[in-house]
Image (tube, grey):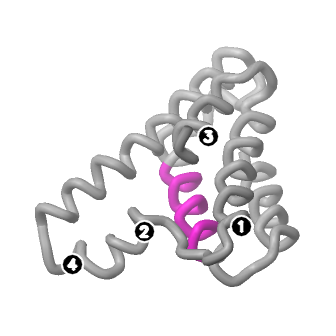
Amino acid sequence: LQTSEIAKALMQHPGTTHECIGAALRAIVDADLAHPTRRGCLIGNTAVEMAGHDTGIAEKLRRMQDESTGWFQARIERGQRDGDVARDRDSRAYADFLANTLTGLRVMAMNHDAATLYRIIDTTIAAL
């Protein structure tokens, strides 16, 4: 399975929203750190290099990013129904925040250690 498929599946597991999103973020970070050559994320790297120059690529990257943002939003809304996320939270805004955090984690995974990245994940989850 691809990293994104693993993360998406982890968000469907039993447990709280905090646990599931945390597990998904850790799985992605762990996969990035496991590579002998840390290259970061294809979507993020392509966006930095090409999106400003090619509207077709920019649109495709946005659709791909929107998919992962959608997983986060769906899990947050599930948590709101289950009672482990406050109902007054804007699920889309927080999903965008998580997607942005994930992008940053993947960039930082190129030259930071697991402890640093996990600390960021823990801080992010605490904000929910």
Q: Is residue 56 above or below residue 104?
A: above
Whichever of callouts 4 and 2 sits on the residue coming sooner in the sequence is: 2
Q: Are marks 4 and 2 in contact (CB under 8 Å)?
A: no
Answer left or right for 67 relative to 125. Answer: left
Q: Is residue 105 magenta?
A: yes
- Give the CA distance from mark 3 to mark 2: 17 Å
Whichever of callouts 4 and 3 sits on the residue coming sooner in the sequence is: 3
Quadrant in which the N terminus is drawn = top right
* Magenta stretch prevailing secondary structure: helix
Q: Between tags 4 and 1, which lies in front?
A: 1
Q: Between tags 1 and 3, which lies in front?
A: 1
**Is disc 2 placed on a helix, strand or loop?**
helix
Q: Amino acid at mark 1?
A: Leu
> Label 1, on which residue?
33
On the question of residue 72 being in view, the answer is: no
**Quarter-of-image position of residue 86:** top right
Q: Is residue 112 above or below residue 27?
A: below
- Give the CA distance from mark 4 to mark 2: 12 Å
Question: Which residues are drawn in magenta?
Answer: 96-107
Answer left or right for 117 relative to 97. Answer: right
> Label 3, on which residue?
7
- Give the CA distance from mark 4 to mark 1: 28 Å
Q: Between tags 4 and 2, which lies in front?
A: 2
> Label 2, on which residue?
44
Question: Label 3: few (<14), some or many (≥20) within 10 Å?
Answer: many
Q: Is residue 65 magenta?
A: no
Name which residue lies at 74% across and 57% down.
Answer: 30
On the question of residue 42 being in view, the answer is: yes
> Label 4, on which residue?
52
Q: Amino acid at mark 2?
A: Gly
**Quarter-of-image position of residue 47:** bottom left
Q: Are marks 3 and 2 in contact (CB under 8 Å)?
A: no
